[in-house]
Image: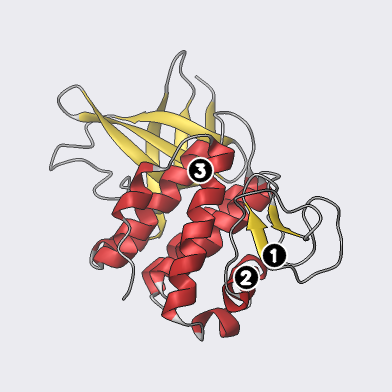
């Protein structure tokens, strides 16, 4: 059987039989894979806790007819322990990996998505930023990589220079008075600045933002995500936001 080795972020796991698990992971070069970890649920398993969600690992697998099989797994970044000790970080991480799973396809290389999700796991484990901000930053950037970058300044429909106050999810972000569809939201100027900062990585502005603008921004991000995925991310309902 042909062997391959790649760096991967574990997205989710499913039980298989009495002692095995199916591991869904996003790899750096091969895209999303589904592979069997045999005996991983036994206390004597050589894999230990390395194949749990949020972990960054070096995987060696051999290709199978239906599912690949893990033969080796070495920990590269043990984010799982730190994230699971903080419920707020845990709920944010769960929403991140579910979104990543939805935005990627098996066997299709997605290096940028891999870098985004591994970076999000590192940020949540380090605890340097509010988990809600890390989540929204990931969602905005992941959507941008997928081809759905929102506009927070110029008009998303005609390109008229901004800033514009109206925001319409279906239109792709901020819209000018001429292009503004009925039912468009009118978020605070500081909310749009926050979302723009999260998209571009301006953490000084993001960390100094007001809680009210964070909450308003999170609602816009969730609506934008749901529109493009065509159904909601279930984990978002469980996300614990910092008051």
Residue picked out by circle 2 = 192
Which residue is rendered at x = 58% and y = 59% of the image?
185
Q: Position of residue 89 (x, y in %)?
A: 33, 65
- Return the residue found at the far top: 65
Image position of 177 (left or right of 146): right
> Is residue 18 visible in this depiction of the protein?
yes
Please tell me in which quadrant of the rendered image residue 66 appears: top left
Image position of 27 (left or right of 25): right
- Return the residue found at the far front: 182
Q: Position of residue 176 (x, y in %)?
A: 78, 60
Label drawn at residue 152: 1
- N-term mark: 1 or 3: 1
Q: Nearer the viewer, residue 85 or 179?
A: 179
Q: Determine the CA span between mark 1 and mark 3.
A: 18 Å
Label drawn at residue 47: none
| Callout 2–callout 1 Cβ contact below 8 Å | yes
> Is residue 54 visible in this depiction of the protein?
no
């Amino acid at each position: 059987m042909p062997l391959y080795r790649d760096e991967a972020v574990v997205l989710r796991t499913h039980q298989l039989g009495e002692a095995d698990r199916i591991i869904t992971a996003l790899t750096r070069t091969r895209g999303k894979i589904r592979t069997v970890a045999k005996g991983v649920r036994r206390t004597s398993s050589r894999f230990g806790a390395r194949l749990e969600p949020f972990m960054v690992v070096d995987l060696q697998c051999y290709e199978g007819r239906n599912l690949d099989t893990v033969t080796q797994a070495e920990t590269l970044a043990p984010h799982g322990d730190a994230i699971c000790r903080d419920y707020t970080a845990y709920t944010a991480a769960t929403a991140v990996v579910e979104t990543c799973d939805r935005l990627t396809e098996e066997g299709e290389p997605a290096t940028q998505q891999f870098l985004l999700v591994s970076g999000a796991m590192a940020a949540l484990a380090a605890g340097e930023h509010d988990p809600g901000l890390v989540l929204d930053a990931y969602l905005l950037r992941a959507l941008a990589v997928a081809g759905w970058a929102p506009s927070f300044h110029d008009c998303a429909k005609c390109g008229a220079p901004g800033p514009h106050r109206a925001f319409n999810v279906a239109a792709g972000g901020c819209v000018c008075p001429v292009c503004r569809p009925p039912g468009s939201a009118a978020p605070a100027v500081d909310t749009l600045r926050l979302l723009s900062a999260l998209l571009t990585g301006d953490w000084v502005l993001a960390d100094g933002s007001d809680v009210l603008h964070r909450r308003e921004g999170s609602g816009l991000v969730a609506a934008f995500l749901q529109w493009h995925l065509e159904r909601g991310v279930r984990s978002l309902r469980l996300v614990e936001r910092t008051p």
